[in-house]
Amino acid sequence: MSTKEHILEAIRKNKPQGTQYPYPVIPSFPKSTKDIKEEFKENLILNAGTCFTINSIEEGENKIKELHPQAKVICSSAIEFPGNKDLSKVTDPHQMDDVDVGIIRAEFGVSENGMVWLTEKGMMVTSLGFLSQHLIILLKPQDIVRDMYEAYARINLRDNNYGCFMLGPSATADIGAVMVRGAQGARSLSVFFM
C-alpha cells in the first residue's frame, strides 16, 4: 500500500458516518437603502467601468459604435447584438485573441460592489470574457441583487461548469504602483442596462 493509499484509508476509517453538520447561521447585516441600480452604477464607476441605459437594439448598436469606433472584430454571445465573429465556429479558445469588442449577457449584478456574474452559458466560449480588448456586459436592472450574501444564494454551482464575478476592466499595478489597464484582460468594461 502506497503512502497516499494508507492516508486515504485512515481517513475513510475515521470519518464520522451519517453525521450531518448544519451550515453556519449567517447574521443579518444592515442593508444599504440606496437605489439598487444607482448603487451598482456608482460602484462600477469607482472601479473604472461605465454604465448606460439602453432602450433599444438600435440605440445599443449606436453606443457600441460610439464607444469603439475602431473596432473591427465584434464577437457576441448575446442574441441582441450578433457581432461579426461567429462564436459557433470557435473550436479553440485562442481563436478569440483578435476580438476587439466582446458582448456578454450577465446572469446578475451585485450593487454593493458593481460586479457581474458571468458563466460559460452566458459567454459560450469562456475566453470571450478575458481575451476581448473591450467588454460590453448586458444586464437587466431587475437582475441586480443587493449584496454578496444574496449573490451567493442565487448561484447554483451544479448548473454551471464555470462562473466568475467580474468587476470593471482588468487592472494591475507593479511595485512602483503604476496602474495598468488591460494587461491581463479587457481594457474597458461597459454595462448596458437592457
Image: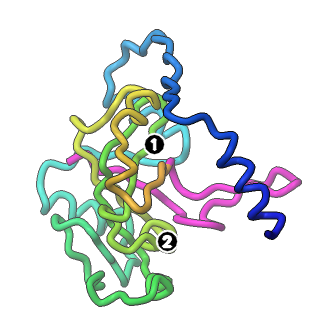
Residue 88 x, y percent position in the rendering: 26, 84
* Foreground of the two, 118 or 179: 118
Q: Residues within 10 Å of mark 1 (few under 14, many from 20)?
A: many
- Decide which of tag 2 and tag 1 comes sooner along the chain: 1
Mark 1 and mark 2 in contact (Cβ < 8 Å)?
A: no
Where does the magenta region start and end? 167-194
- Image quarter where the N terminus lies is bottom right
Residue assigned mark 2: 133
Q: CA distance from mark 2 to mark 1?
A: 19 Å
Rendered residue at 42%/80% (across/down): 99
Rendered residue at 49%/28% (across/down): 20
Q: Is residue 133 above or below residue 31?
A: below
Residue assigned mark 1: 115
Residue 66 x, y percent position in the rendering: 32, 64
Residue 175 x, y percent position in the rendering: 87, 54
Mark 2 or mark 1, whichever is nearer to me: 1
Does 145 sit left or right of 53 as displayed? right
Q: Residues within 10 Å of mark 2 (few under 14, many from 20)?
A: many
